[in-house]
Structure formats: C-alpha cells, structure tokens
Image (tube, helix red, strand yellow):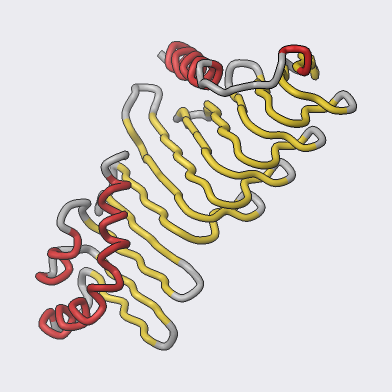
Amino acid sequence: MKRMLLYVLGLTLCLSLFMSPHNLDAASSMSTLELGNGVTYYGETKNGKPHGYGTMTWGKSKAYKGNWVAGKRSGYGVYKAVTSDKDRVTDLKYDGYWKNDKKDGKGELEIREISYEAVMLENRIQKGTFAKDQWVSGYDVRHGEYDPPYYFAYKDSNLSLKILGGAENILDGLKVGYFFSFTYQKGKVYKDVGVGDEFSQKQFSSFIKSVEKEIKPHINQFEKLAQKL
C-alpha cells in the first residue's frame, strides 16, 4: 500500500508539471542537463547552468517548473514534492515567487499529509508573502483529525487574528459563542477568549460587532480557503 501510494502521487506530480502549458523560446535555446543523483534539467541555460525558464526533476519525487537565475530558482515558478517518513506521506505544492532557491515574495503553499492507509492527517494552506522560505504574512489555514477541526490565522504588520473552530458561518458563530478560541491583536487592543474562560458573551459580541467590518474580509477568506482542504 505504501509503495503504491508513493508511486501514484509521484506520477501525478510529474505529469502535472510536464503537461503545464508555457510558451518557450525557439528549440535551439533549450538544453538538457544531467546533474547526477537522478536530477535532470531541461530548459534555457547560461554558462552551463539553468537560466531563464525550465523544468528540473529530482527523480520521481520532486519537480520545479519556472524561472531560474544562475542555477537557482528565482522569479515565478511551481514546485511539487512527495516525501514520506515512518507513518505518513506528505504532498507539497508551492505556487509563487522565489529568490536564490528559496520561497520569497507572493505565493501559496499547500501541504497535505496522509497515512499509508490513505487517511487524511492534516491539510494546510499558507497564502500571502514568504521570505527566505518562511511564510511571514497573509493566511494560514489548517484542517486535521483533531478537535477543533480547523485553525485559522491572519497576520500583517498591523493585525494578528486567530480563530479555532468550525469552517462555516464563522462570524455568526463568534457573535453567539459558537467557537473554540478567538485571538485579536492590533496595537494596544488585545482580545483572547477560549473555551473554559470566564467571559461575558454579551460584551464579547459587542466587541465582535465593533471590529466586524475589519475582520469580515479575512473570515470570508478563511472560509474560502477551507473549502480547498
């Protein structure tokens, strides 16, 4: 079961990249590079290195299709990888911008973890801005086999918002107390309420209404991203 699952995911990964359409320059500008250890590159080159647009594969488990500068992923590109450890298979996709072989700029990272019995363990989407391979701002949404089932987070230079609970009618749920935890921070304004805390639902509902216009677009995005999980 483990080997079959890895084979299917790896085959899907390779086909999805190689079948993606892209207008390339004349064939004479394209080169194939065999870089050892199962690593192959086909695309534009300069001084014997990937430079311009091309595709690199690392065996059947990893592939990148996009822009290169002096042998490193730089500019826009799509990277996909299927890896495994002792109890799970991880299917990863990053669609966005790169700099010096690291995720850097606007992008969307999807990570799906399943057991060898094909049971979903956790799905995650990070969408926004990345720097040096790390998500730094935007949306972080997770869904897993735990309680509560969903984790939602948004952050930028001014606002930090986190909600744990369900994925439907989130705003209405906050107003009536149907949520697991809620954290809001903007400047000196900080609100942190969770299951088991002693708080006035009436006062909390008033607070939610006072920030509703601000947080509603982010909650709408939470619900939209949750549908992809």
From this view, report whether residue 50 is shown above or below residue 154. above
From this view, report whether residue 108 is shown above or below residue 26. below
Q: In this figure, what is the number of numbered marks?
A: 0
Q: Position of residue 54 (x, y in %)?
A: 68, 24
Looking at the image, which residue sits at the far right? 47
Q: Position of residue 200 (x, y in %)?
A: 14, 84
Q: Is residue 201 visible?
A: yes
Q: Nearer the viewer, residue 146 or 53?
A: 53
Q: Position of residue 141 (x, y in %)?
A: 37, 51
Report the side of 191 relative to 36 (left or right): left
Q: Which residue is located at x 47 percent, y 68 percent?
A: 156
Report the side of 70 relative to 115 (left or right): right
Q: Is residue 39 visible?
A: no
Quadrant of the image for the C terminus? top left
Q: Position of residue 81 (x, y in %)?
A: 55, 28
When asked about the image quadrant of residue 211, the answer is bottom left
Looking at the image, which residue sits at the far bottom? 188
Report the side of 102 relative to 117 (left or right): right
Q: Nearer the viewer, residue 19 or 202?
A: 19
Q: Which residue is located at x 58 percent, y 21 percent?
A: 61
When asked about the image quadrant of residue 184, the answer is bottom left
Q: Which residue is located at x 52 percent, y 38 percent?
A: 95
From this view, report whether residue 167 is shown above or below residue 206. above
Quadrant of the image for the N terminus? top left
Q: Which residue is located at x 22 percent, y 77 percent?
A: 197
